[in-house]
Image: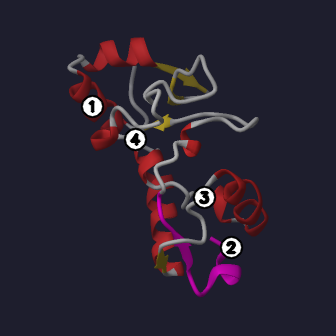
Amino acid sequence: MSHKAWYHKGLRFECTQCGNCCTSHGEYAYVYLAEADVVAIAGHLGLARREFLERWCRQDEGYTILHMDAPQCPFLTEDRRCSIYPVRPRQCATWPFWEDNLERERWEGPVKDCCPGIGKGELRSAEEVERIARETEDWYADTPEW
């Protein structure tokens, strides 16, 4: 990752449980799923793996993603809480430390505008931030078979 220079002292983030990261803000709204995500969520919902895939997912350019008819995650409740929080996808669990978000302009622009937790809470070292981003990218190499 080549973004490290600007955040060499680390980044602060604390989840405020606002649900903003679960909602599209005029951009794409994709939640990518790895095989482990599919298995965990299906089990949590009491569904067979195949049933979960057919009911809640679609394929897009070789990736498995949650199917979204609305501009928000289908598992976001009316009170803006995650109904599958204990087994939420890795993509959700690692927000905002995604490789794309670590570009300075994006972090200080749309990411900060969307997320009131940016700049608050625990200071994460640059090494930890990059480890999370790298592991998240690697996680999605395990795309579920349909």
Q: Is residue 61 left or right of residue 131?
A: right
Q: Nearer the viewer, residue 79 or 135?
A: 79
Q: Amino acid at mark 1?
A: Val
What secondary structure is found at the residue carrying circle 2? loop
Amino acid type of the residue tagged 4 in the rendering: Pro
Q: Is residue 86 magenta?
A: no
The first of marks 4 and 2 along the sequence is 2
Tell me the kind of residue under disc 2. His
Q: Disc 3 vs disc 4: which is toward the camera?
A: 3
Residue ID for mark 4: 89
Question: Residue at horizontal 39%, vertical 25%?
Answer: 145
Residue labelled with disc 3: 116
Q: Which mark is residue 3?
A: 2
Amino acid type, residue under disc 3 in the picture: Pro
Q: Magenta stretch?
A: 1-15
Residue at the spot of label 1: 39
Locate residue 99: give its quadrant.
Answer: bottom right
Q: Position of residue 39 (x, y in %)?
A: 27, 31
Nearer to us: label 2 or label 3:
3
Front position in the image: 2 or 102: 102
User: Callout 1: 10 Å neighbours few (<14), some, many (20+)?
Assistant: some
Residue 53 image offset from top left, x and y in percent: 39, 18
